[in-house]
Amino acid sequence: MKSAVIVFPGSNRENDVADAIERSSGKRPVLVWHRDSDLPNVDLIVLPGGFSYGDYLRTGAIAARAPVMQEVIRRADKGTAVLGICNGFQILCESGLLPGILLRNASLKFVCRYVGLKVETSQSLFTHRYQAGEVLSVPVAHGDGNYFADPATLDRLEGEGRVAFRYCSMDGDLTPEANPNGSARNIAGIFNPTKNVLGLMPHPENATDKLLGSTSGKALFDGLVDSLA
């Protein structure tokens, strides 16, 4: 599997996700600078976490208009797998590849801790190594992770099976207490209509090694290798 990680000014998880991909695939992703207007021929494009452009205007708003994003959007529309994590999820929403927007956490505080994450579907190239209903332990680290969309959009995501993950207790309960940021319907990650684009706020790349405290995220990257190699 060939992969590329897009790097913006303020990205801080590009090497973390590159390590996670290398653990699963044995191949180091290419790091692509935001000003580049071309991308190598790859099977997977990743938009990593961080604070692109210092989170000025809105989180992800400037990065969504970076030169490289025109090619990311073109590749996504042609079926290339695209994964956006944390700030990458915000960029995907700002670019129009995913619906909705990420607002300030309901607590108005930065949240950095492990959370319970329920797998809503195994029917995707990102999640097929999981069982629907499986509960993962994955860290979050964000101040603007509160997923919001209008009721019609939320209903459409639900009806089309496009909710990938929800925040939950470690027993799998979808409680307000288990929701670290106030996201609508405890939504932690969503797909585009063809499910080749996934955006999520938690950091699966930081849950791929026992030394990191959890290996719950490794199956996501293993599954991508299965699907794309």
Image (cartoon, helix red, strand yellow):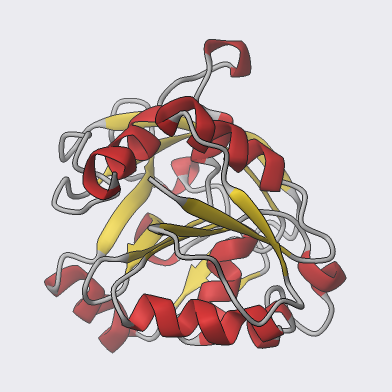
Q: Give residue 206's quadrant in the image.
A: top right
Considering every residue shown, the one lying at the far top of the view is 211
Residue 174 occupies which quadrant of the picture? top left
Left or right: where 110 falls relative to 197: right
Image coordinates for residue 188, horizontal then vertical, percent:
43, 55
| Figure label count | 0
Residue at 80% from the left image edge and 85% from the top image edge: 57
Residue nearest the observer in this picture, 130 or 222: 222
Residue plotted at (68% across, 68% down): 104
Residue 99 placement, left or right of 174: right
- Name the spot of residue 91 as percent of width and height, x first: 60, 73
Q: Measured from the top left, where is residue 95 in percent x and y?
A: 54, 85
Name above or below for residue 9 compared with residue 15.
Answer: below
Left or right of 80, for residue 57:
right
Nearer-the-camera pick, 228 or 190: 228
- Classify residue 138 as left or right of residue 193: right
Is residue 27 visible from the viewing direction of this image? yes
Q: Residue at x 23, y 77 (%)?
A: 193
Q: Residue lying furthest front in this view?
A: 41
Nearer the observer, 25 or 218 = 25
- Image coordinates for residue 142, horizontal then vertical, percent: 68, 52
At x 33%, y 31%, the residue is 219
Residue 99 seen in this snapshot: no
Quarter of the image for the C terminus: give it: top left
Relative vertical location of residue 4 with respect to residue 207 in this rendering, above or below: below
Quadrant housing the N terminus: top left
In the image, residue 201 above or below residue 95: above
Residue 39 against residue 210 in the figure, above or below: below
